[in-house]
Image (cartoon, grey):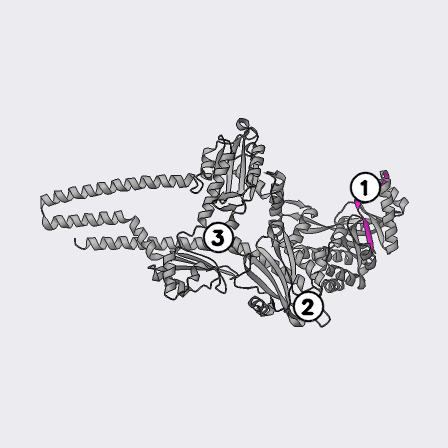
Amino acid sequence: MLLILPLGISYLLRTDGIATDKYIDDRRNYIEQVLDTIDSSFSAYEQLIYTTVKITEELAPDKAEHEAALKLAFSSSRSALVYGIGIWYEPYSFDEKTERFGPYIHHIDSNNNKEEITYFWNTPEYNYQNREWYKTSLAAKEGEISVSPPFFDSDYTYITFGIPFSKEGKKTGVVTVDIVLPQLQGYLSDYNFSDFSGVYLTTKDNSIVFSKTDASNAAIEKHAMEGEQPGLFTDRTAVYDENEITSFFEGIGQKPEILTSETENGVFRIHAFLDRKAIFLNIIFRHSLQYLIFFLFWTSVLYLIIFNSSYLKRNYENRLLNTENERLTEEIFKRKEAESRLTFQAYYDEVSGLQNLNSFMEKEEALQPGNDNRSLIQVSLNNMKELSLILSSTIIDETLLAFTTRLKSVCPLETRLYRARGFSFFVVYDDQKTGSSQKLAEKLQNEFRFALRLGSRDIRLRAKIGLVYFKDAESLEQVLAMSQSAIAGLDVADSGRVGLFDHSVQEQKARHVVLDAAMSQPGFISELYMLYQYIVKTEDRSPAGFEALMRWKSSVLGSTVSPAEFIPMAEENGLIIGLGWFAIEEVLKAISGPLKNSGLFVTVNVSPIQFIELDFPDKLDNLLNQYAVDKNRLKLEITESSAAAAIESFWQIIDELIRRGYRLAIDDFGTGESSFHRLYSMAFDTLKIDRSFVTGLNLDERNQEICRSLMNIGKTMGSQIVAEGVETEEEHRVLREIGIKYSQGYLYARPQPLSETEFGKS
């Protein structure tokens, strides 16, 4: 009997220990989910720096060429996290006659998308070769990205991705991409780390980029007075020292449990500290009633056995019952308070006092598609995260409360106000009862142009306002999604405009995502195929050659995708080079196969991105030698608009190809902004008149004059002229009268597989 009490308590303690381990495992999974999110966010910037290195290795030592390459890479990043991109050279990279430079492009006004290019060399003010980030990046292995410790400038905190580049087989310098950390700070602040004693996000060199601890200021100060470093808990650029932090938490009475994880590429690590003792005691406290009941029960039993007194027994039972009643009454009261508090937290925002999204989903009536008078105005404060970095949480709460007060004062009493996640607010408005929601949205837009006054401080809020109508949606969830899309469609230049939901924009974005995913499938290239369209002699319509046109029949989408969709997507996601070589090799197979004895030429479209690929002319030579194809049988075709936007290295490759005997054609001639001097000096073999000048040619004398002028330009440049888009006999007749020698269009033949042409059939 005497052993039952200690054995029972031991069993309860063991059960609570298992519960503690389970809780810690749950927190470990949560930390790994946070890290997975960070890992996916930074994969795009690794690809950006690899692409920039590839371009840099082809650049000549020319400032203008470097500026163009940097601007192209900088604009393609499309991320507020990318602050700057730099190209930094070793001293031996330049001869004595060449001006030395280290170009660096960065934001000077991120809100207005303004950037600036600065040049550095070994000046006393900034000798970058003595910078730690430069040495670390230069020492990295080929293809390996280094990450510098975080550093501050006057505006932001950064980390630097760096990777060396080589020229002529020798390391020549490094390319860097600076990533702004405050937005990462704001992103992580949305996660709930309240259960952790401390959370530290570090780079692989143990530099802290985000830290959060529940240690009190008094504990930190006491720790500092004992010779330690409080900066571990207040300065986000400190170095992570696990032993020191563990010692700190042990010094304030905790028993640290350390949860550590890192991203797959090793760039970031997260270290989370849990107080095992506090968790265990908290679980015991929650089960205190069980311990108490167990203890009191067996104590009373022993007491009755030992004293065997009926009076003491009855008296003890009465006291036990009274105690239990009091505890139960107190427990009931606490539970009612807790339920009331949980109900408020579930349906109301504690800061503003407004109802939250749970209330919106439960209290708003079901939609009546096509016949619903309600509208939703979303007011999103898009600079609150920035303010959170420089203002205390108390001031942020006061700002939100002042904003809520002003919002209530502007909106009619009949409106219903909600606070969404983050810094967004919803106004539900009945147009039939209270008037035009468009006017209310514009009124709110004007109202929040003025700063909020908090004591002696003026705080300027930048509000984006979107408007959607319930009748256009089928559910409350869709209303919220449409509202978010309306807000997302606004940029900085639209600060004075109310955003309206646009179905076409949403469908276009959805289509963009679906196409990108389909192109990422392993079998994407195998789904491509080539069609061939005749280019004929205008005089007698006899075949002169073919234009090879790429097509894609996607197994994922179950349909054929237009080149107008997947070619720009391929240029954006980096697949265009693979597509280009596929097209060139298919054409070479056709020329060396079915078309071998035909004497016809074949033109194939090539993206400007392909031309600036490393060793493009040499690779092209090797392919022609492999298939034993004469260069006169192949024409490389580029559009005039893309040629006009190309960088200097592109024209250098064009010049090299022409010197090697390749034939090049300009497509859509007359619609772009090409330099005639450039076109003349490059001696293009063929100029193709855009179909916009050919369509209805017999009815438009101006287009006839344009075609004559373009033909004369071609003669002056020594180039062949091909008219595209010929669809009627009248158009053919006029082209023949003008003297255009070559034509192409549906009148003669549609694009078709080579096997269906007269040459493929033979």
Residue 350's image quarter?
top left
Q: CA distance from mark 1 to mark 2?
A: 53 Å
Mark before the other along the chain sequence, 3 or 2? 2
At mark 2, the secondary structure is loop
Residue depicted at 60% across the width and 62% down the height: 176
Q: Earlier in the sequence, mark 1 or mark 2?
A: 2
Q: Position of residue 457 (x, y in %)?
A: 50, 47
**Residue kind at label 2, given as amino acid type:** Arg
Q: In x, y percent, where is residue 23?
A: 37, 53
**In the image, what residue type sits under mark 1?**
Thr
Would you place residue 408 above or below residue 684 in this image? above
Residue 735 in magenta?
no
Q: Nearer the viewer, mark 3 or mark 2?
A: 2
Q: Residues within 10 Å of mark 2 (few under 14, many from 20)?
A: many
- Residue plotted at (51% across, 47% down): 384
Query: Which residue is under mark 1?
Result: 695
Which numbered mark, 1 or 2, is in the foreground of this view? Answer: 2
Tag 3 or tag 1, which sits nearer the N-term? 3
Distance, label 1 to label 3, CA atoms, is 57 Å
Kind of residue at badge 3? Leu
Secondary structure, mark 1, is loop
Q: Which mark is residue 100?
A: 2
Q: What are the residue bounds of the magenta stretch?
A: 684-698
CB under 8 Å between callouts 1 and 2?
no
Give the crowd class for mark 3: few <14, some 14-19, many >=20 residues within 10 Å: some
Farthest-out residue, front = 456
Relative to 95, residue 177 above or below? above
**Tag 3 and tag 2, C-beta contact below 8 Å:** no
Residue 596 appears in the picture as rendered: no
Tag 3 secondary structure: helix
> On residue 188, which mark appears?
3
